[in-house]
Image (tube, helix red, strand yellow):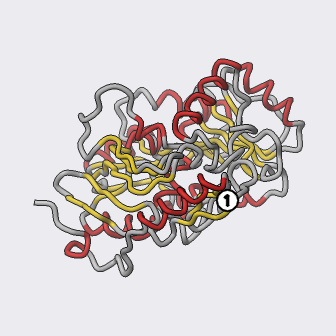
Amino acid sequence: MTESHDSLTPHNNVAKDNRAALQQQVMDAIDTRTPLNICGNNTKSFLGRASQGETLSLAEHRGIIEYDPRELVLTARTGTPLTEIEATLAEAAQMLAFEPPHFGDGATLGGTIACGLSGPRRPYAGAARDAVLGCQIINGRGEHLRFGGQVMKNVAGYDVSRLMVGAFGTLGVLLEVSLKVLPRPAASLTLIQECPQNEAIQRMSHLLSQPVPVDAACYHAGHCYLRIAGSEQAVRHAQKQLGGEPLKDSISFWHSLREHQLHFFLSDKPLYRVVVKPATPALNIAGEWLLDWGGAQRWLASDEPQALIREQVSATGGHVTLLRAGAQADVVFTPLSPAMLHLHQRLKNSFDPHRIFNPDRMYAGL
């Protein structure tokens, strides 16, 4: 039996279905060809290119609709605060496996999914996209559409619901999202070791293929941090196997890393997100580096020319996103090849033929 959210937890003080009003605003925008800036509580407005258009807010479209801890599935409206979802899951000793960043107290489910954000656990438990089972949207014709469902094996053909993850609202208005959730590990411990960067890269990338219960690994300020999680016995065994000193306030450290609250992220320099193969040696680009995701996600604070950074990262097969100091930048995401641009244009034309949803948020002309 699937219970309602109200019967499971008292956290949801406000539950509201604004679907009809949102659909009407989209229809009006189509009639007048008015661009819409889709947003929740604007905790992630710094991501991507500058927003434009009339505000279409989903902040009041909120509430957990269904949650069955036995089935490990939760469905919620997209204006639902992440804090509310995480508190509800915690009551059943469960969690969002992809450990999403909030970047503010008002972070919503919709903003998290639209931006495709995943935290330190991403290489070990999957990305935000991997957790999405289904969604409901309003497309650029004003139609209410449902994709996917609430079970893992429900997709025949292309999984459109996961296409919405990381699309920054350019393809439609997300109304509801169904997510796979996971049990919280019984025990967790963070080990810290002092070492040079390339040694940390080799160590972290090697562990990605080993039967060790590591669920986060980063390198910061000359130290390698390894978080191990699982049963008490598994954690104790891994601690002996990996070595290093236990980190006392590990919860605070990983929270600060996830939310960009470490001192590293307070730099005035432009901040780049560099994604490469985990074993890629340290890149010869001047600036300050912090490595996450076992070496696959590397944060760079640098005044070097953006073109130089993109050229060197591209040579390794990686890609670059300008995360901060990029709100007014013309190029934020990795430029698209002609073939990829054509594909993006076809998708945009299919879902948003009048180009009213978050125009130019990712790329000029899309």
Query: 59 or 303: nearer the eye?
Result: 59
Q: Secondary structure at mark 1?
A: loop
The foreground one among 206 and 26 is 26
User: Which residue lies at the image location 66% right of the left edge and 39% below the top edge?
Assistant: 298
Residue 80 visible in the shown view = no
Does 233 appear above or below 85?
A: above
Q: Position of residue 46 (x, y in %)?
A: 71, 57
Within the image, what quadrant is residue 352 found in? top right
Q: Residue furthest left?
A: 1
Residue sitting at 38 percent across and 33 percent down? 159
Specify the quadrant that holds the N terminus. Answer: bottom left
Give the quarter of the image for residue 171. top right
| Residue 348 shown left or right of residue 207 in the figure | right
Question: Image height check: is 176 above or below 291?
Answer: below
Q: Residue sitting at 32 percent across and 41 percent down?
A: 148
* Amino acid type at image mark 1: Ser
Displayed quadrant of residue 156: top left
Image: 306 above or below 257: above
In the rendered view, does 271 fall on the left or right side of 19?
right
The residue wearing badge 1 is 45
Label 1 environment density (alpha carbons within 10 Å; few <14, some 14–19, many ≥20): some
User: Residue 164 location in percent, x, y?
Assistant: 49, 42
Q: Nearer the viewer, residue 315 or 205?
A: 315
Residue at 71%, 30% in the rendered image? 282
Is residue 26 among what the camera can see?
yes
Q: Quadrant of the C terminus?
A: top right
Name the spot of residue 273 as percent of width and height, x first: 68, 41
Q: Position of residue 327 (x, y in %)?
A: 78, 53
Query: Image check: 44 left or right of 2?
Result: right
